Image (spheres, rainbow, N blue to C red):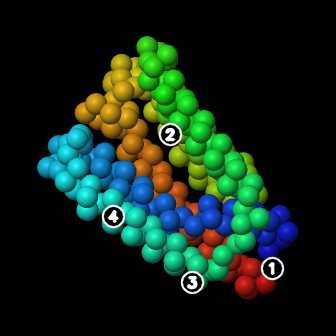
Amino acid sequence: MIDPQTARFITRNYPNMQGLVQVPVGTFVTLQSLGMILGWPGFQQGDCTLATITVPLTILFTFLAIQYYRKNFGEVKLGAMMPTILSSSLILVCWFVISILDMTWLKNIPVSFTMLVIAAIFLTFPVFSAGWRRYYYVFGALLAISGFLPLLGLYTKLDLFGGSRWMGNIGIGLTLVLGGLLDHWTLVRILKRSKAG
C-alpha cells in the first residue's frame, strides 16, 4: 500500500508521470536537431519535406501513448489536476517571455537565459514530486551548465537554438526522452506497489 502523500502526488501529477507521452516529442526534437547539425537532406532550416511526415507521426505516437495510459491505468478527474495544469501554463508563459527577452534585450550577454529557464523548469520537477523524479536534478544541472557554455566562447547562445548547431534542442530532446522513460518506469513502479499492498 502507498502512503497518503504518494497517493496525493500520483493523483495530482498522473498526467505528468505519463512519460511515454513526451517520448515522441523528445525524439522528434532530438532527430530534427541532429538532422540540422549533420546536414541530413530534408532537415535544413526552411525545408519542411520531412516535417510533413515526422510531425504527424509524432502526434500519432503521442496519441497512442495517451491511449495506452487510459487503457492500462485509467484517468484522473480534471479537478485533481488543476494545480498541475495552472503551474504548467505559468511555466510555459514564463519560458516564452524569457526566450523573447533572451534574443532581444539580453542578446549581448553570453549566457543563455532561455536554457537556464528550461533547466530551472526541469529542476522543479523533483521538488513537487514527494521524493520521486530525482533524476531531473541531473538533467536540469546539465542543461544549466550548457546555458553558461557561451561564456567559454565555444558557441554563441544563438547556436543553442538556431544557427548551425541547435545544441540546446538536442539536450532538451534527450531530457524529454530519458525523463519520459524514467517517469513511466516510476509510475509503473508506484502503481505496482499500490496493487501489491
Image-based side of 34 in relation to 63, left or right: left
Q: Amino acid at mark 4?
A: Pro
- Frontmost of labels 1 and 4 is 4
Real-space Cα distance between discs 4 and 2? 30 Å
Q: Residue at x 29, y 60 (%)?
A: 54
If you read the primary sequence from the N terminus, does the residue marked by circle 4 or circle 2 appear first? 4
Question: Can you identify the residue that label 4 sits on?
Answer: 56
Image-based side of 132 in relation to 151, left or right: right
Question: Can you identify the residue that label 2 sits on?
Answer: 142
Circle 1 residues within 10 Å: few <14, some 14–19, many ≥20: few
Q: Which numbered marker is on residue 1?
A: 1
Residue 167: horizontal and vertical position, in percent?
A: 35, 38
Of residues 132 and 163, which is closer to you in this image?
Answer: 163
If you read the primary sequence from the N terminus, does the residue marked by circle 1 or circle 4 appear first? 1
Asked whether residue 114 is in view, the answer is: yes
- Frontmost of labels 4 and 3 is 4
